[in-house]
Image: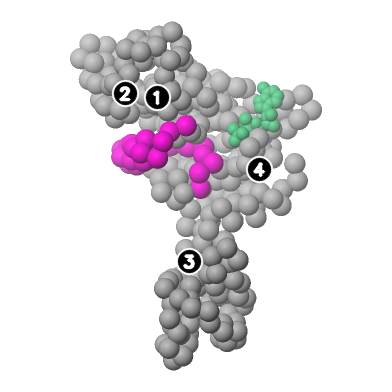
Amino acid sequence: MISVKNLTKRFGGFTAVDNLSFEVKPGDIVGFLGPNGAGKSTTMKMLTGFLTPSSGEIRIADQAMDQSSKHIQQRLGYLPEGAPAYGDMTPIQFLNFIADIRKLKGREKQQRLDEVIEQVALTEVLNRPIENLSKGFKRRVGLAQAILHDPEILVLDEPTDGLDPNQKHQVRELIQNLSKDKLVIISTHILEEVAAVCNRAMIIASGRMLFDATPEALQKKSRYYRAISLHFTQMTDISGLAELPGVADMEVERHSGRVLLFPEGEQELMPGVSAYIKNRGLQVDSLYEEQGRLDDVFRQMTAEVKV
Ligand SMILES: Nc1ncnc2c1ncn2[C@@H]1O[C@H](COP(=O)(O)OP(=O)(O)OP(=O)(O)O)[C@@H](O)[C@H]1O
């Protein structure tokens, strides 16, 4: 369990993290979201004991970070932003080195190395200097070192940054397949990643917490949530759609010609829209209810925050 109270970090006169309080429990996979400079990396550095807070308290598994950082660090894995590693080492040398620091020995050490190398698909580059690897492979070396000792707590700063779509998918699967009693915090700029992997979304901007709930609850805040999206096969008079009961607003997307009908409150529009189309014999090539657009909510929430 992580418990954070009134966490603040100032750099000179600038407040990067501003009075954050939250708790994270085993089983939580938290997507930590925020625009550039929101304070995500700074928060993660404090959570992992690499940066001292200006004020506030961090407790992990009932130990205070300012008193027991070494103990806490044994229980967590951390992938920092960028890909810091010893560039002139090869991945296998680097991972052996990390395994020794993590006090893994003998059969267990070899077993963990084999497992992790397979999990993050590093076999083909094991003997090349890390500095010569592509960004994606460097990122995977970073991930491997974070999970090597099978920690209960994982803090991953943009784990899929620089990966190609297949690798992104693999890393998401890896995170999803971690045992259910782990506690994971992932920062990302990819909103779909949060919907795909996380069961909790936190949004910060200017160091302050704006939202902390499930990704579904975040989606529900979108103005597109339960909006009806339809596209007509031919030019059609659509003025009647805006008059249907429960329709608060209608928009036509200029580039696609797609019609969007926004509901008043929680009203369900699909039955009325379907009946309207059927009764008039109109031809549509697509008709569906939107789930809500995360990028839209994110923009709306973070745009309101003054930097
Ligand atoms: N050591 C430092 N000294 C001064 N300012 C810093 C330092 N580290 C971070 N900052 C500032 O604190 C703010 C938060 O930075 P941080 O890296 O935590 O943001 P972030 O949310 O991780 O951004 P990004 O998504 O771009 O990685 C930024 O304005 C940054 O310039």
Q: Residue furthest left?
A: 107
Residue 13 appearing in the image? yes
Which badge, 2 or 1, is on the more N-terminal residue?
A: 2
Determine whether the beta carbon of the residue marked 2 sits less than 8 angstroms from the nearest atom of ligand 1.
no
Instruction: Please tell me whether mark 4 or mark 2 is closer to you in this view.
Output: 2
The residue type indicated by label 2 comes to Leu
- Number of the front mark, 1 or 4: 1
Which mark, by number, is residue 137?
1
| Residue that numbered label 2 is attached to | 122
Residue at the (60%, 75%) spot, across then down: 250
**As rendered, which of 164 and 67 lies closer to the eye?**
164
The residue carrying mark 4 is 205
Q: In this rendering, is residue 165 above or below 154?
A: below
**Residue 246 x/y as whole percent:** 56, 82
Q: Quadrant of residue 172?
A: top left
- Secondary structure of the residue carrying tag 1 is helix
